[in-house]
């Protein structure tokens, strides 16, 4: 089995709420049954997934592996790496907002100004 495909399947399982049916991977990635069985056997042995009644779910050990492998950012850390230059005062709901056109790239400014008649 292709390593990239195995990681993609684990990531899909990580993002799913209650796991995914094996058929889902066939329909998404056109994986043949024998390749899917290899994936299930390999990752069940590592205790990353559980396979029950045609449904594959990721285990806590599998979630830890995906978090390490893909460096997925937890919800509370999602906005911590935003540069200060992109952070400004919050505007009120339904208040008017005019963007600063002078801060746009020159090419975009030219398109906007060229469109005015």
Image (cartoon, rainbow, N blue to C red):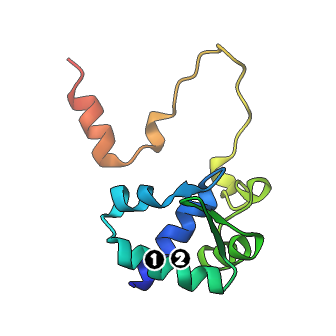
User: Marks 2 and 1, Cα distance to the nearest angstrom?
Assistant: 5 Å
Mark 2, other Cα within 10 Å: few <14 / some 14–19 / many ≥20: some
Point out which mark residue 40 bears: 2
Residue at point 59%, 81% (across, down): 43
Q: Observer-nearest residue: 27 or 75?
A: 27
Whether the residues at callouts 2 and 1 have beta carbons within 8 Å, the answer is yes
The spot of residue 86 in percent (x, y) is 63, 49
Residue bearing mark 1: 37
Residue 48 at x, y percent in the picture: 67, 77
The residue closer to the viewer here, 46 or 37, is 37
Q: Considering only vertical position in the picture, is 1 above or below 27?
A: below
Image-based side of 33 in relation to 57, left or right: left
Q: Secondary structure at mark 2?
A: helix
Q: Position of residue 69 (x, y in %)?
A: 61, 79
Which residue shows up at 47% across the image and 61% down it? 22
Q: Secondary structure at mark 1?
A: helix
Write down the quadrant of residue 49 in the picture: bottom right
Q: Total number of numbered labels?
A: 2
**Identity of the residue furthest to the front in this view:** 53
Instruction: Pinpoint residue 30: horizontal percent, then vertical percent.
Output: 30, 64
In-front residue for pair 24/92: 24
* Residue drawn at (36%, 71%) of the image: 33
Image quadrant where residue 102 sits: top left
Q: Residue at x 53, y 76 (%)?
A: 40
Vertical position of residue 26 compared to residue 70: above or below: above
Looking at the rendered structure, which numbered label has been put on residue 49? none
Which residue appears farthest toward the right when viewing the image? 76
């Amino acid at each position: 089995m292709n390593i990239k495909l195995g990681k993609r399947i684990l990531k899909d399982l990580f993002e799913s709420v209650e796991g995914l049916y094996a058929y889902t991977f066939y329909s998404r990635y056109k994986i043949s049954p024998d390749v899917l069985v290899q994936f299930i056997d390999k990752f069940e042995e590592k205790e990353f997934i559980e396979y029950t009644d045609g449904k594959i779910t990721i285990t806590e050990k599998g979630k830890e592996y995906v978090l390490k492998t893909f460096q997925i950012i937890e919800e509370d850390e999602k906005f911590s790496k935003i540069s200060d230059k992109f952070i400004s005062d919050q505007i009120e709901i339904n208040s008017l907002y005019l963007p600063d056109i002078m801060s746009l790239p020159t090419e975009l400014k030219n398109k906007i100004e060229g469109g005015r008649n």
